[in-house]
Amino acid sequence: MSILRKLAFYLVALFAALTLNFAIPRMLPSNPVDVLLGKLQAQGPVTPETRQALMLLFGTDTSVPIWQQYLDYLQSLATGNLGVSVTYFPTPVTEVIASALPWTLVLVGLTTLITFVIGMVIGTIAGWKRGTWVDSLIPSTTILASVPYFWLAMVLVYLLSVTAGIFPLGGGYDVRRTSPELSFEFLSSALYYAALPALTIVISSIGGWILGMRNMMVSTLSEDYVITARAKGLSPKRVMITYAARNAALPSIAGFAISLGFVVGGSVVMEQVFSYPGIGNAFLLAVQNNDYALMQGLFLVITISVLGANLLVDLLYQFIDPRTRARGV
Amino acid sequence: MSTNPEMSSAAGVATPGRSGSVAPDSPLLSISGLSIDYLGERTVHAVANVSLQLGRGEIIGLAGESGCGKSTLAYGINQLLVPPAVITEGGVTFHDRSGDDIDVLALEDKELRRYRWNKVSMVFQGAMNSLNPVISVRAQLNDVFATHRPQMSKAERRLRSGELLELVGVDPKRLDSYAHELSGGMRQRVMIAMALALDPELMIMDEPTTALDVVVQRDILLEITRLREELGFAVIFITHDLPLLLEISDRIAIMRHGRIVEMASAEEIFFAAQDPYTRQLLRSFPSLTGERGDFIRHGAQLENEEVR
Amino acid sequence: MAELITESIAVRADAADEEPDDSQRRRGRSAFWRRLLTPKFVVGAVVVLLIVLFGLIGPLITQDPNAIDNIGLSSPSGAHPLGTTSVGQDVLAQLAHSTRGSLTVGVLVAAFTLGLSAFFGIIGAYIGGITDEGFSLLSNVMLVIPGLPLVIVIASYVESQSVLLVIVVLALTGWAAGARVLRAQTLSLRNREYVLASRVAGERTWRVICVEILPNLLPVMSSGFVFGIVGAVLAEAGLSFIGIGATGSLTWGTMLADAQNGQALLFGAWWWFAPPGLLIAALGAALSLINFSIDEVINPKLRTTNIAKVERRTKREHQS
């Protein structure tokens, strides 16, 4: 029953996002179509089709009532018609997104997951062995957590790329030597170019996980069931993992879902520093070029991914914590 | 209030089924001169120079007001203290049924883990929280077996787990339950079952029934005494509830400010208590006619005594 | 960053959960200050103070940050202690003005966000019923929709990009998390005896909220406010960096954006892009330290050094 409730919530959130996407351009004082047309016209003559497409997208055809526009908008979404990109004219938005999405998913998604896991492990050990040298790591990782993602990226680029020349300056892969395909050349190149961005994510976000897990371990260790487990003479490893960590990790896992939203936001900026060909970069290009169609399409995709990830973690949580299954929380 | 004549025997009666190379009336556990301090801005002497001898199969009650040190003592003799609590002096010796004398406080790591639960098990205050909330009861019992009896097969473990639950009056189907699915009384019974899993010679029970309602409390107490008769383990029963101890204990030790002020058999305490504090404790049962009570829970000074 | 915030809020929430202990309160005052003034706290407080002073007084004594000069990009020298930008502007002066700008944005956003969180969280939870359901749904939805992209989308549609816009947009997208926490706290406080007592005695709703509930929410709210400042500064920096921030004004974010656009990295102009980021990190770290120190006072179990010291003393005494 609770699963249904959750799904319902996410559907509501999805609709809210879609409606926001629909409503914002229509609510603001300036007419986006005119602004856009103005900019486009500076680059060359605008075809009537483009003008029509834009008007359709933004519903500035005031002869059509708002609710009709909304339905048209939803319908076009359902058929997968997200419009045509201005930046990559005449490529449809869906294609642009399809080519950019894998980059971000792999880089940001994978790295965040790895950071989470490593951070939790270190946090577990730090909490278990409280009062040892591991504790002294905490302040430094805390400081790193307050450093802005992109600034850290800049520093790393400066140190490891410009100065030391170990890593490339930017991009997704070596454009001169390979192109996207399933080959060792390409994959190894992609990995090489992903190293710095990945490093940035790891360094700046691991501190939070370590601290959170450590503090939870510290409080969990004083719980009755941990003391009982010790009194039972169970091996320290078993107590640390199955009795302490499994309980201490629960809030962090919940927090992981929330942080997914922040991660997506952060990737937008970071991909700009590294000129990484992912969603974030496309989003920025869209913004800078006033490519409203691409921007709305990307916002949609980002929102759906975040909602989807949240839903997944929510459901996962049901498996991990048997108490939620009963209460239907 | 009645005393069970069978249980008022002196310490060290040999119980059936406990053969071995020990003399029937040699002690099971010897605590000598144990002192435990809580280090900090002001050092607190939680336990001061406590000595007592526990006989095989004997039930000793540890009574006293909150903060008198009884729980600290219990944790201490099992090496479960965490800093800032520290044992400053004294010793604890466990006289194994095979004839060995184990210096409990000197045990470390693997030996300590082997000693734990095998020889001495504990039932903690408020078993509400003694069960790991995220794994099943079966898994927790399995943990005990896997650690201490690795030679047991899966089938044997399942059998034994079922037996244990039945022993304490819980349906074996409950093995797959999680902690939150059990009522308070059931959780406590499960804890007792777990404590009995390895057939220990001593069970330490720290306020095992305080958080339960009186009816369940009675059931559990009957259960404990029945099991003790059947299996013959000794019990250190810690509580502030003196009347309860008078019913089930062989001997009772009254603690105050970290010391044992009096130790005698249950009848002696009830009929002829020596120490004035003991007498004060006895006088403050909530009586049926509604006179003063509440003394034990909040502590008070004796008449004519100053605050320490 | 988010994990640190949820962590600290959990600690404060825990503390608010416990009933106040009379004896603790009596000897509380001086002990509180003694426990608070740990090295950790002092370092944090001093750093924050220095940064604030820099932002307040700096702009008064440095050069004109916007004055263009022919030297172009130059490294630190006597005339320009932190060098110049690619168009010859004095970096130190820019830094001072940026500090003021960023701090203003940070504090204002944190304040507005707190106000919104308090409104949606506390009032909804206290009144209960449909209001609560509605507010709560709203917060959850706002929480789950990705913040930064939303901010970018909104900001990009508006013609004039000013500091005020940034502040408003950041507050509008950031209140959800705080609202959820405050709601949970209020729900648990609502049923405490002293709150029920005043309701039964006929106290008016707003009085109950102000007198009984708000004071107990102060720890959580203060933690949220402090971290809110850090979050706002970071968010503004991010926005400015991608060009949708307060493009006219001087903030740490706009400085970094200029540095990026002026190819500071390629030219190795560390004096241009390093200081703004360092200041952001310093402010964030210092505020975090302050928050953690307060956390440790509130929840003694978290204290690290104490335990280690006691353990060592324990071992020593046991061996002797």
Image: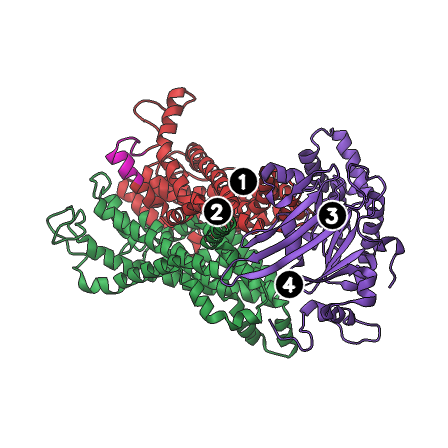
Chain colours: A red, B purple, C green
Of circles 3 and 1, the one toward us is 3
Task: Give whichever of discs 2 and 1 has the lower sequence position.
Answer: 1
> Judging from the image, what secondary structure is the residue with disc 2 in?
helix
Q: As shown in the figure, which amino acid type bears the numbered disc 1? A: Ala
Could you tell me if residue C130 is visible in this image?
yes
Q: Which residue is mark 1?
A: A78
Q: Which residue is mark 3?
A: B203
What is the C-alpha distance between the residues marked 3 and 4? 22 Å
Of circles 2 and 1, the one toward us is 2
Q: Which residue is mark 2?
A: A259
- Point 25% across, 47% down: residue: C273
Q: Which residue is mark 4?
A: B67
Q: Is residue C228 left or right of residue A14?
A: left
Give whichever of C47, A162 is nearer the camera: C47
What is the C-alpha distance between the residues marked 2 and 1? 29 Å
Same subunit, tags 3 and 1: no
Please report, as a chain letter, where disc 1 is located. Answer: A
Q: Is residue B128 left or right of residue A189?
A: right
Same subunit, tags 2 and 1: yes
- Point 43% across, 59% down: residue: C293
> Judging from the image, what secondary structure is the residue with disc 1 in?
helix
Q: As shown in the figure, which amino acid type bears the numbered disc 4? A: Gly
Q: As shown in the figure, which amino acid type bears the numbered disc 2? A: Ser
Question: Which percent across, then down, holds residue B231?
Answer: 82, 43
What is the C-alpha distance between the residues marked 3 and 1? 67 Å
Determine contact: label 3, label 1, CB under 8 Å. no
